[in-house]
Amino acid sequence: MSMTSRPDHSTGITSDSDAAPAPPCTFVIFGGTGDLTRRLLMPALYNLARAGLLDPDFRVIGVGRSAMSDAAWRDGLDRDIRSFAADPSAEFHAERIDERSWGWLQDRLHYLQGDIGTPEFFAALADRLTGNVVFYLAIPASAFGPAIDRLGDAGLLREAPGVFRRVVIEKPFGEDLASACALNRRILAVAPERQFFRIDHFLGKESVQAIMALRFANVMFEAALHRDYVDHVEITAAETIGVEQRGSFYEPTGALRDMVPNHLFQLLCMVAMEPPESAAAEAARDERMRLLRSIRPVTPQNAARGQYAAGAVAGLPVPGYRQEVEVAPDSRTETYAALVLDIDNRRWAGVPFFLRTGKRLGARRTEIAVHFRRPPADPFSSLAFAGTAPNTLRFQIDPEHRLALGFSARAPGAAMRLQAAEAAYQAPDAEAEGSDVGYEALLYGCMRGDATLFQRGDIIEASWAVVDPLLRAWSEGTPERYAAGSDGPASADALFARSGRGRRAVGQA
């Protein structure tokens, strides 16, 4: 097999003759001393430096309230990246740090103390900025609107010919439909849509981007993903961890807000949207928008929720959600959400999509499982089946990066018998020198002005519109309890059973 590109597994980005460094720019991180910067943004920038995808004139300004020098900030990030590299459970881990690449990036790290709530700070920031700038809002969601207002007031979002100014906005973008619409109106009064890059790190995952390539570059997959052949689709994001130390964030948020209108809907779009007319960013985003607008709003009758109680995960006892730090002892926040979506378009009419996400479940798994219909006429129906099931196509995203096709095959022996078989493609593992944290392609795309992997304002609003009736309904009542380490609440089983289908266990291979 001949290949025109060489995968650089240290970054998750393909290095080829067309991959040029991003244009020179200053990367300003509001929240420069925060966890997101330490754990994800700085390792991603390091990986981009290793891949040769940053311009020699690239530089970073970290903004924070703490008083410190450039050298102190660099030293802290140096300790962090080395600590994460040695931790196999961290998003970024490596057997060794490429000292040349890390030193190159460190030389370009600068720190600015200031309060982003004051106009005086933005005047001081403006004195440091010329040319292209990316402003990254690694700050609480409540500060997004005020920060963008002040960027506009200071003239920092004003572009000139050949000079760009862009803003990356982290999630959550709003907490419901009304707040998302209000935030969109607020920021678009400051600058046009093309300057805003609403980020969802799920779209940066190599395995998620691979779904589009598998679908649209292979006629056998694209033709089969149709109501004529598909019985139902399951999209799962199951976690074994609890809320850890994030109780103060999770209490007003819950599983539905935290995962469904962003992460799970991104997976839904990848597997269900129509082929875009071209590789242009707006073509792909238009198709995601069309799909989301064709989904019926979800009602409580088509959803189930739960909250984990004490139990055991991997044989170890764990507390219930209400015993976690900064969680109310009578909390009504859901840690599990399942819903059935109906898509009203020609491709998917009549095919239910089951989405579920939860914490403290029995296994960690993120995947899309497409379940196909049984053959309309089966000459083998009278034969003994050894564990066979309808054909399945599974896009496994986490912890494996794998495509698995399940089908029936003849079992060895004198008698005709069928058995379950599987053909799988395993994505190459990252090399030991470094691991992709999922932000590399996103940051590189933003610096190049490619918005393909980012959310547009109308897409955000369409996503919230699907779940908004459910959010209002779930503001009352109490979620069903489920034991930590289980498969979730019994009401989720009933949700599947009402459609005449059974759900896959989260730990099922």
Image (cartoon, rainbow, N blue to C red):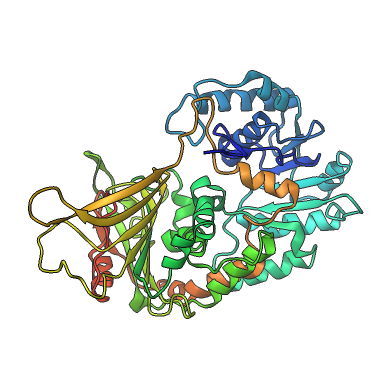
Residue 76 percent location from the top left of the image: 62, 26
In the picture shown, does residue 458 fall above or below 455?
below
Whether residue 34 is visible, yes or no, is: no
* Label tally: 0
Residue at left offset 54%, top offset 29%: 434
The correct choice, above or below, for 363 with respect to 195 in the image is above
The location of residue 25, given as percent across then percent down, is 80, 41
Residue 174 vs residue 501: left or right?
right
* Nearer the observer, 108 or 114: 108
Q: Residue furthest left?
A: 414
Find residue 193 and report its image quarter: bottom right
Residue 177: name its quadrant: bottom right
Q: Residue at x 72, y 22 (%)?
A: 71
Along the viewing direction, whichever of 27 and 52 lies nearer the viewer: 52
Whole-percent x, y for residue 96 in the image: 54, 20
405 over 90 or under it: above or below: below
The answer to whether 106 appears left or right of 207 in the picture is right
Query: Residue at coordinates 16% horizontally, 51% vertically from top-left?
Result: 411
Q: Classify residue 435 as left or right of residue 390.
A: right
Residue 229 in the image: above or below residue 80: below
